Amino acid sequence: MTTYIGVDDTDSQDGMCTTYLLTEIIRELDFPVLFGYPRLVRLNPNIPWKTRGNGALSIALAGNRGSAFKIGEIGGREVLSSYQPSDHEENADEVLTNVSSVIEKLAQFGEDNTNPGLAISHNRPDSGFYWDAVRGIVNRDQAKSVLSRAGGTARTWKNGRGLIGATASISWVPRERSFEVMAYRERERWGTTRRLDASDVLGLSSRFPTTFSNYDESNRHTCIVPSSPCPVLFGIRGWDSSVLEEAMLSIRSEPRDRWLVFETNQGTDDHITVPQGRLELFHSYMLSGTVSSAPVTIRGGHVFFDLELNQDRLAIAAFEETKELRKVVTRLIPGDRVTVWGGLKPGPFGRCLNLEKLAVNALAALRVKKANPRCDVCGKPMQSAGKDSGYRCRKCHTKSGSAVYVSVERQIQEGLYGVAASSRRHLSRPPEWSFSTSSGHPTELTNAG
């Protein structure tokens, strides 16, 4: 019988990583054959109290050793997985005790926002809970309830908020998925400058085309390396799990202490919904409408414009962190029809949608004034008669309301534009990729950005 183990909220802004803690859980359980891949499940990215990437972790035990394949190494030992279940049944109380000991040893309890939760169940909880957690806001009592209905067991520390992610990670039934191989540092190197060859990262996407978000060429930023002092050396994301070990080994770096391949919801846009009613703060939406105001840039380089939505208006924000996307936004004009993706949050002009992607669906004609009209009587150029008063000939006193306008080529094209790879949210689907509705696998999409 399969045993699901979910854990969340053990890290902090200053250290640890729940993915590393999961490798220690595997070690503590004496390297069982996993059923499927370990899971790294990102949840609602708009939650104000998240620690870093709002990722929850889980594993399933009772894979069949006879059909097992390698998915990682810890301390020189292989981590094995299988998609065929075995007849072995784990003792839930024993698993609870062993996993709890790892959490109590490694979790960052001194951090206010670190509130670990552990979920163990022989049955997968209702998958609807995952969708509630990735798209909305749920509470610990809801997590307890859905876990209890599945016959599961919970353990929490401090306020226990991590139970939400722990339960959501084991309730996830993927519609689309990606993978990430994570390599970890030797413990004595934690907190020091990471050492790896940037040129190997620069060519990673060309050597392994199914990997993504490796390097931000525009900003010369290595995206596979975390910025926090956590145990992770680097992580490579991709749609094909079979190439990730080879991709990892192609990176020349400081010694790797261990590595593991995770199944993830990264790059799937699972957090995005098409609204059916009132828009709610801290939710992520895809909205289509018409640009109704010229973009305005405020201090800090943040750009805002208004989008008209069925006789309503919503402020759209391209913050400085979106990098090149701001330039695209500044070239919009009223009348352009666009689709926007992003999270709804409080902003300097009330609630606003923080852009993750932008599709320009149709461009309005841009006409600029070339000259004042000429008098029909004497042929001389007319002059303005005042604001909203048209034009008047000084000699003949003839009036006219029409200046000479010409059409100007727009400095933007229809197409899909995204934020810089270095600023992209884990869940956001890269704009250069789209999923086939039949296979669930990505197919390349032309990027206009």
Image (cartoon, rainbow, N blue to C red):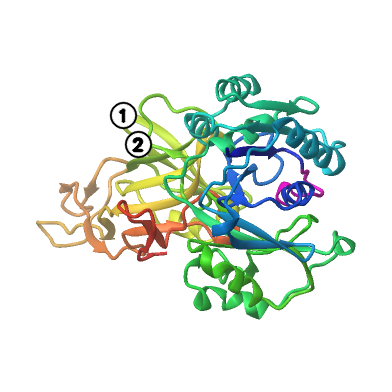
Q: Amino acid at mark 2?
A: Glu
Up/down of 142 relative to 326, above or below: above
Look at the magenta stretch and give its main secondary structure. loop
Q: Secondary structure at mark 2?
A: strand
Query: Residue at the spot x=31%, y=59% of the render?
Result: 414
Query: Residue at the spot x=39%, y=42% of the render?
Result: 293
Whether the magenta-drawn stretch holds residue 356 is answered as no
Mark 2 touches mark 1? (CB < 8 Å): yes
Residue closer to the observer: 136 or 259: 259
Instruction: Identify the residue at the far left of this view.
Output: 377
Q: Could you tell me if residue 384 is visible in this image? A: yes
Instruction: Identify the residue at the far right of this view.
Output: 188
Q: Could you tell me if residue 347 is visible in this image? A: no
Up/down of 447 relative to 270, above or below: below
Residue closer to the observer: 146 or 334: 146
Up/down of 29 relative to 95, above or below: below
Q: Amino acid at mark 1?
A: Gln
Q: CA distance from mark 2 to mark 1?
A: 6 Å
Q: Secondary structure at mark 1?
A: loop
Query: Residue at the spot x=55%, y=34% of the render?
Result: 345
Query: Residue at the spot x=51%, y=36% of the render?
Result: 352
Q: Which mark is residue 311?
A: 1
Whether the magenta-drawn stretch holds residue 17 is answered as yes
Q: Which residues are magenta?
A: 11-20
User: Which image quarter is the C terminus in?
Assistant: bottom left
